[in-house]
């Protein structure tokens, strides 16, 4: 459940309150999560011709049931939260996924029906741990963009060097690997991922014996340095999110303790007032 921030401290009454309590109840949330998982499985089963031949009708019926359940869920949330529903990003995400699910299976929009598989992404809006991981990824985007820019610069420099030096050799293999800037960048990407990079390096070194220095330096800079920076930024973002949540939890615990202390103090004051009132009544009787 993702309640809009502006409604976090709001207490609903009447029918709206009962609906809000329903959609925010953990059993209701678990039911929707279970439907998402089952629907993801059935969407996968629909890709098997044999399964679709024998059980296609049942899968379609279940698919309609899931779409109806998601539509009812979104409708209930819209009724409870009104326009504030769209002030939470995850709610907008859920709304778009359900709208895509409602696209008719026939006509020119048939291709959009394939996007039904994105329903499983709704788990990220339901499972708190998934939301934390995704938030950390989004928080890491600025740092990752900077590293990506550095990597593109390195790729461009290395590709220009490879094209100018290795691409001048008339051998067809060398032309296929380094014939132009595009081929060079694709070849270097394969080297960076360490996927069969010896198959690239071997023919190059055969014509340019010193090329091993080029490949070693490129792999060290890209695979072992820059890519590890991506991992480091993501891990750092995860730590920041975790620390923020721990701090938020500590603040909430402090507020709860202080509230309990104030409640006890109020009870003590009420008890003293009762005793004082009793003494005053007894004095008046005397």
Image (cartoon, rainbow, N blue to C red):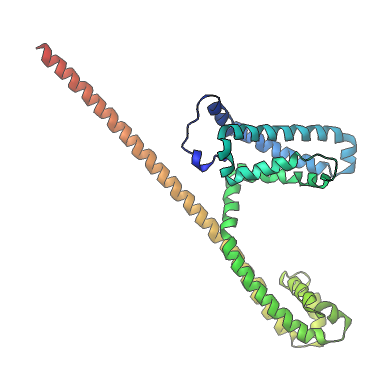
Q: Residue at left 82%, top 87%?
A: 168
Residue 276 sits above or below residue 63 on the image: above
The quarter of the displayed image where residue 235 is located: bottom right
Q: Percent from the top left, x then y, of residue 75?
A: 64, 33
User: How many marks are shown on the rendered structure?
Assistant: 0
Q: Residue at left 18%, top 18%?
A: 278
- Location of the N terminus by quadrant is top right
Q: Percent from the top left, x then y, of residue 158?
A: 70, 80
Regarding residue 25, the answer to whether it shows in the image is no
Between 122 and 133, the one nearer to me in the picture: 122
Residue 43 sits above or below residue 228 on the image: above
Q: Residue at left 82%, top 42%?
A: 45
Q: Percent from the top left, x then y, of residue 42?
A: 78, 39
In the figure, is residue 87 to the left or right of 108? left
Q: Percent from the top left, x then y, of residue 37?
A: 71, 40
Residue with the most extreme left position: 286
Q: Residue at left 74%, top 40%?
A: 101
- Location of the C terminus by quadrant is top left
Between 214 and 36, the one nearer to me in the picture: 36
Regarding residue 165, the answer to whether it shows in the image is yes
């Amino acid at each position: 459940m993702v309640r809009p921030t502006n409604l976090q401290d709001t207490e609903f009454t009447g029918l709206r309150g009962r609906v809000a309590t329903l959609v925010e109840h953990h059993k209701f949330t678990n039911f929707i999560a279970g439907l998402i998982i089952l629907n993801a499985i059935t969407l996968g089963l629909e890709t098997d011709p044999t399964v679709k031949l024998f059980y296609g009708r049942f899968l379609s019926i279940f698919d309609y049931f899931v779409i109806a359940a998601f539509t009812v869920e979104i409708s209930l949330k819209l009724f409870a939260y009104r326009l504030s529903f769209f002030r939470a990003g995850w709610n907008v995400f859920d709304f778009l996924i359900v709208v895509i699910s409602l696209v008719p299976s026939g006509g020119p929009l048939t291709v959009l029906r394939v996007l039904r598989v994105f329903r499983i992404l709704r788990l990220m809006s339901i499972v708190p741990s998934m939301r934390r991981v995704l938030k950390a990824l989004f928080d890491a985007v600025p740092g990752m963009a900077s590293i990506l820019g550095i990597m593109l610069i390195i790729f461009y420099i290395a590709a220009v060097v490879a094209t100018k030096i290795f691409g001048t050799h008339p051998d067809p293999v060398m032309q296929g690997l380094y014939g132009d800037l595009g081929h060079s960048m694709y070849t270097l990407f394969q080297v960076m991922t360490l996927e069969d990079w010896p198959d690239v390096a071997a023919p190059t070194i055969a014509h340019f014996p010193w090329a091993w220095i080029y490949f070693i330096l490129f792999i060290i800079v890209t695979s072992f340095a820059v890519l590890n920076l991506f991992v480091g930024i993501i891990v750092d973002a995860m730590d920041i999110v975790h620390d923020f949540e721990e701090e938020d939890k500590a603040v909430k615990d402090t507020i709860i303790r202080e509230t309990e202390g104030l409640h006890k103090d109020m009870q003590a004051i009420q008890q003293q007032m009762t005793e004082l009132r009793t003494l005053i009544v007894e004095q008046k009787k005397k």
